[in-house]
Amino acid sequence: MKKLLLVVILFTTILSVKQASASSYSVNEQAIDQLFVNAVETSMVSANATDLSSLATNVPTIAMAPQKDAVVAIVLDFFLGGLGIHRFYLGTETLTGIGYILTCGGIFGIVPLVDFVVLIIDNKDISKYVNNPKFFMWN
Amino acid sequence: MKQIFQGIFLFLGFLFINVTLHAQQGGYISLKQQTEILENKKKISNEVDLFYDNNKQIITKYYHAAKEFILITNSLGEIKTYYPASNEVDYKQIGELSSKRNLIYYFANNLTNDLGLVDEGFNLTSNTYENQFYVTLWKAPSFLTGIETVKMVFENGLPVYSEYQASKKKIIKKTYYTNYKDFTQFRLPLKIIEISYLPSGDSIINRTLFSNIKVSSSPDGKYFNFKIPDDAKPVVTAKGK
């Protein structure tokens, strides 16, 4: 009887874990909607590339800061890497930056992710990434 | 005489089948794409009119940005950007930005098994069932540092969820594909929600909504076959490129 009970408990646990895992494949859309409703709409255009909250999304050009700071680039990549904002900050061809948007956030977020890693590794000297026209700036 | 009639009927039959198939293929897709990004209780949004010619695999996007522009991309990654206000044009060739790497291409052509992961060098390592979900795991290619695995989950044959993992316990990004709409030859999620997780514990939510979707066999839209004016001047950048 004790063994049977243990088997039932084990089975129930496995089932509940599976259910919990499966439920994580859907999103609470109402909660997301609410977040967007409560959010403050900010400007799409910004002349200040370091102002994270109001950076442009898909405008072709953004005013560049004269000095390129690795930390700023890393932070921009983290926050808005999928939009290629860090590339605009570092300086690149307009279309290279837009390319991040065209490929769903830089090939589904992979490119900004790699950018992030290489920026951290080379944080002491990011000169090779400044004004780099290549889509894969590390290549 | 009989043979001539037979020939005509055969030709008409061929023509009918061809036209019918072409119409079903949904060669021309136009839609409105609205993107909203939420970060730290602030949001930014933009709208794009997208026109996809599935026969020529050309994507034309009209950006409702502060500086409006039209972007045309083909399967070779040849990109033309036209700025109507200044009548300027910019040409580029970036293979990575090919129209064949756009999400709309994968959905319109029913290439939803991996949504381009194979093209990017990912390898399928496992596939299992979890209730009604078909769960696949993809190993990242060695040159992609910082990312280990991508989990892609399907329901009724359609991708509903994907997850980028830096390690088994560290999720970088979750994407949910919801509100699928059936068209004659394909299905498209009308809403894509992407949540990126930051090391600080905060997150960025990116929501893309597709609306006003029209599928037709003929180019029924302003920017299909959009032609950049012959007198458009090349873009002159500050660097003089």
Image (tube, rainbow, N blue to C red):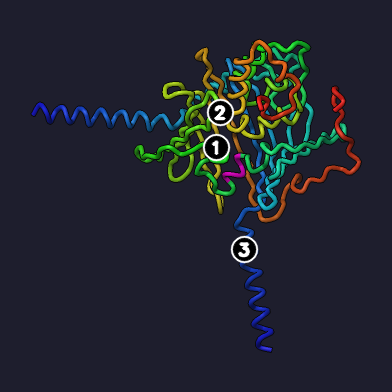
Q: Nearer the viewer, residue B79 or A21?
A: B79
Looking at the picture, do discs 2 and 1 lie on one chain?
Answer: yes
Q: Which of marks 2 and 3 is nearer the N terminus?
A: 3
B34 in the magenta segment: no
Q: Which of the 4 image quarters holds residue B121?
A: top right
Q: Is residue A54 above or below residue B237?
A: above
For the residues bearing labels 2 and 1, Cβ distance under 8 angstroms: yes
The Cα atoms of the two marked residues, 2 and 3, are separated by 44 Å
Compare residues A127 and B175 and report the one nearer the observer: A127
Is B105 magenta? The answer is yes
Front one among B120 and B74? B120
Which residue carries the number 3 mark? Answer: B20
Q: Name the residue under label 1.
A: B121
Position in image of residue B35 (x %, y %): 63, 30
User: Of the residues tagged 2 and 3, which is closer to the observer?
Assistant: 2
Asked if badges 1 and 3 are on one and the same chain, I answer yes
Residue A117 picture quarter: top right
State the quadrant of the N terminus of chain A: top left
**Dot 3: what SS?**
helix
- Does mark 3 fall on the same chain as mark 2? yes
Q: Residue B144 bears which disc, if any?
A: 2
Asked if B130 appears above or below B196 in the picture, the reply is: below
Could you tell me how far apart the alpha carbons at marks 2 and 1 are, in whole angstroms? 9 Å
For image coordinates 62% across by 53% down, the residue present is B26
Between residues B216 and B75, which one lies in front from this camera angle?
A: B75
What amino acid is found at the position of numbered circle 2 in the picture? Leu
